[in-house]
Image (tube, rainbow, N blue to C red):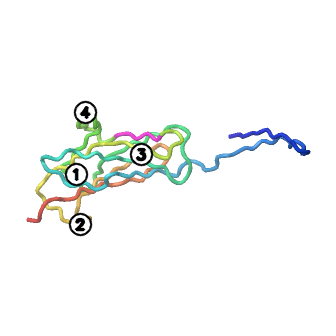
Amino acid sequence: MTVSATVEGGHGVAAPLERQLNLDDNEGPPKGIRLSAEPDRVAEGDENDDPINVTIKAMLYGGGTYKTAQLVTVTVGDPNDTATSADYDYMTNQETDDTDVRTTFDITIEADQPSGTAIFMLDPTHDTIDEGDSDETYETLTVSGVHGGSDVEPTSITIVDNDDPP
């Protein structure tokens, strides 16, 4: 970026010489992207519960921003999760409530912006299994991402059990 200004002399002072000021962006590209979920804890559903809107935010860290829009492909669920497809359904189109068989959706981080968001609908499945009453026993669902130029740190959503012990 180049900034220039004109200054005139006066009151017996000569006009200064013209100078050019160059500002260099030296932040460099971001080191990575962190995903977060809001909410990051949801209650196990019952037959009458509506799906929950979950906002996934992709935030740049460790540097500046990108000069062009960036796409982060987000995946819900991992084979190593304690929550399996029997524990939840999700829909990627909140306007039509269409259950989508895909497990991915995209988040766009616009040019010169530090983050981008997308919303998906999560419908925790009602079951009668007591999974315990602690973070160690609740079911966990991983939300991970892929980006061509940066590492993406995943996040998780905890499905809190609502069943009584037998």
Magenta stretch containing residue 141, yes or no? no
Residue shown at 36% from the left, 47% from the top: 56
In this rendering, which labeled residue sits more in front, label 2 or label 4?
Answer: 4
Q: Quote the CA–CA distance across marks 2 and 1.
A: 18 Å
Question: Cα distance, mark 3 to mark 4?
Answer: 26 Å
Q: The disc labelled 2 sits on which kind of residue?
A: Ser
- At x 75%, y 44%, the residue is 21
Query: In the image, 23: left or right of 112?
Result: right
Residue pointed to by mark 1: 84
> Which label sits in the foreground, 3 or 4?
4
Secondary structure beneath dot 1 equals loop
| The C terminus lies in quadrant | bottom left
Judging by the rendered image, the residue that carries numbered circle 2 is 134
Name the residue carrying label 3.
146
| 3 and 2 marks in contact (CB < 8 Å) | no
Q: CA distance from mark 3 to mark 2?
A: 31 Å
Q: Which residues are magenta?
A: 105-109
SS assignment for the magenta stretch, majority: strand
Give the amino acid at mark 1. Answer: Thr
How crowded pointer 2 is (Cα within 10 Å; few <14, some 14-19, many 20+) is rated as few
Q: Earlier in the sequence, mark 2 or mark 4?
A: 4
SS for callout 2: loop
Residue at left offset 43%, top offset 52%: 34
Q: Earlier in the sequence, mark 4 or mark 1?
A: 1
Query: Which mark lies nearer to you, 4 or 1?
Result: 4
The image shows residue 112, relative to residue 81, as above or below, that is: above
